[in-house]
Amino acid sequence: MNITDRIKRSVLRRHELVLRPADFQAFGSEASVKRALKELVDQGLLVRLGVGLYAKAKRSVLSGQPIPVRPLEELGPMALARLGVELRESIRIRDYNAGRTTQVPTGIVVNTGRRRITRKIGFNGKFVEYEHDRVKA
């Protein structure tokens, strides 16, 4: 059984929806793991969310193309949590819930506190946006 088959079997057994190459370190070298993950993306078992981030995939009923099993609104925060980023409620959602605005928040916005994140996480042209806590003067 080659490394791609072993990783494929491992992906199918896992409950996590967001995966990283580090999850499969035991199967082989970093280069061979990345090569196997690329092959699984080509097969439609995984989709790439960003550098070193993959999500389980399913076939779209409309186009037949692989899409993530959950929407990016759920996978984005999961991916950041896998990277060790602590998330907070976004300022837009906080203002809406408190009644300070009637503007309904749209898009995928996460608050990373004072931490600066430049990593692009997304799929099919839709990306996670980051906001930071305002500095109190």
Image: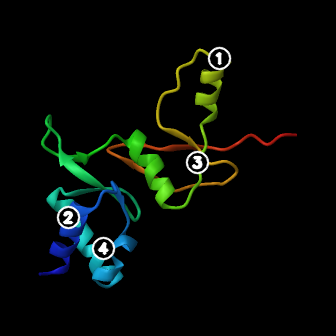
Residue in the image at 70% along x and 51% along y = 114
Q: Which residue is mark 3?
A: 87
Q: Which residue is mark 2?
A: 40
Mark 1 or 4, closer to the camera: 1
Kind of residue indicated by mark 1 = Gly
Image side of residue 50 versus residue 12, left or right? right
Pick the residue in front: 4 or 38. 4
Q: Which residue is mark 1?
A: 99
Residue 50 numbered mark, or none: none
Mark 4 or 3, closer to the camera: 3
Labels 1 and 3: the sequence-earlier one: 3
Q: Secondary structure at mark 1?
A: loop
Labels 2 and 4: the sequence-earlier one: 4
Q: Secondary structure at mark 2?
A: helix
Figure check: 134 above or below 84? above
Q: Quadrant of the C terminus?
A: top right
Labels 4 and 3: the sequence-earlier one: 4
Residue in the image at 30% along x and 73% along y = 34
Q: Secondary structure at mark 4?
A: helix
Question: Extreme bottom residue here?
Answer: 29
Instruction: Compute the Cα span from label 1 to label 3.
Output: 22 Å
Instruction: Compute the Cα span from label 2 to label 4.
Output: 10 Å
Q: Which residue is mark 4?
A: 34
Q: Quadrant of the N terminus?
A: bottom left
Instruction: Give x and y (percent) for residue 81.
Output: 50, 55
Labels 1 and 4: the sequence-earlier one: 4
Q: Are marks 1 and 3 in contact (CB under 8 Å)?
A: no
Instruction: Give x and y (percent) for residue 120.
Output: 47, 53
Q: Are marks 2 and 4 in contact (CB under 8 Å)?
A: no
